Image (cartoon, rainbow, N blue to C red):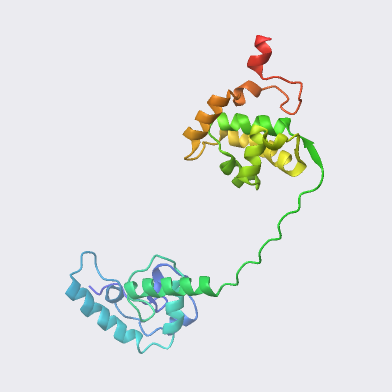
Amino acid sequence: MRKTTIERTGSPLVLDTPITAWATKAACKGEELELFFGPDHEKQADREKREQEALSICRSCIVVSECLEAALSQGARQWGVQGGMTADRRRTARKGRDKLAVEEAPAPKPKKPQRLSTERVDVVGTMRRLQALAVIGHSPKAIGAVIGASSSYLNDLRTGGARMASVSVEVADALAREYPRLVRTPPGVQSALTMRNAAKQGWDGPPAWVGVDMDDPAARPRETAAAA
């Protein structure tokens, strides 16, 4: 019985691509499919001999460039002889093409630093949120990466350094917006150290502020309110 042949499109890509005009002109039309896609557990000597025979057909093909482009567009999934190359050679070619595309891509224009407004709000809500997040392991550096603020600035806000009484409205709003999500997010690798420092300071964690207005200077955490 005759083995399956490349008849429908005239291209090894018949397995994964729709019929295209160039494929009907391929030199491999009518050839045995197994010539281009060998069997499993094929011996190396048999594979090399088969691939050379398949490549000889590709060398006479007028649409080999189109076939190669179509094969490379399949991504990392490369197999068989297609486009005048073996699967190994196409993997190398694709990596080189992807690297070149990255190198030639225009560098992104640097973003202009966002200018903070002069509007400021009471620091107490921001300080309480930073302290509560420290109790569960979120460091100023990790929080700063989320809200776009420097870790040193957030550390000063958290500890009341430099006698800070106010904070920019952008930082306060960004932290208030991200605070619920951060409470539910596991902290990073510095969590143990951050938690130990928070415990030494006696800061209140998120549970103490549930149902309490953290931005109200007169408000007290739940444990303190209960003890009063």
> Which image quarter holds the C terminus?
top right
Rendering coords of residue 185 (x, y %): 55, 36
Rendering coords of residue 155 (x, y %): 62, 38
Mark yes or no: residue 71 visible: no
> Which image quarter holds the N terminus?
bottom left
Residue at position x 73%, y 54% in the image: 114
Rendering coords of residue 68 (x, y %): 42, 78
Vertical side of 34 occupied by 167: above or below:
above
Residue at position x 72%, y 31% in the image: 125
Rendering coords of residue 142 (x, y %): 56, 42
In front of the other: 149 or 21:
149
In front of the other: 52 or 7:
52
Residue at position x 31%, y 83% in the image: 55
- Hey, which quadrant is residue 76 in on the image? bottom left
Residue extending farthest right: 119
- Hey, which quadrant is residue 218 in on the image? top right
- Hey, which quadrant is residue 30 in on the image? bottom left
Vertical side of 188 occupied by 46: above or below:
below
Q: Does residue 49 appear left or right of residue 207 in this picture? A: left
Q: Does residue 91 appear left or right of residue 144 in this picture? A: left
Residue extending farthest front: 162
Residue at position x 37%, y 71% in the image: 91
Q: In this figure, what is the number of numbered marks?
A: 0
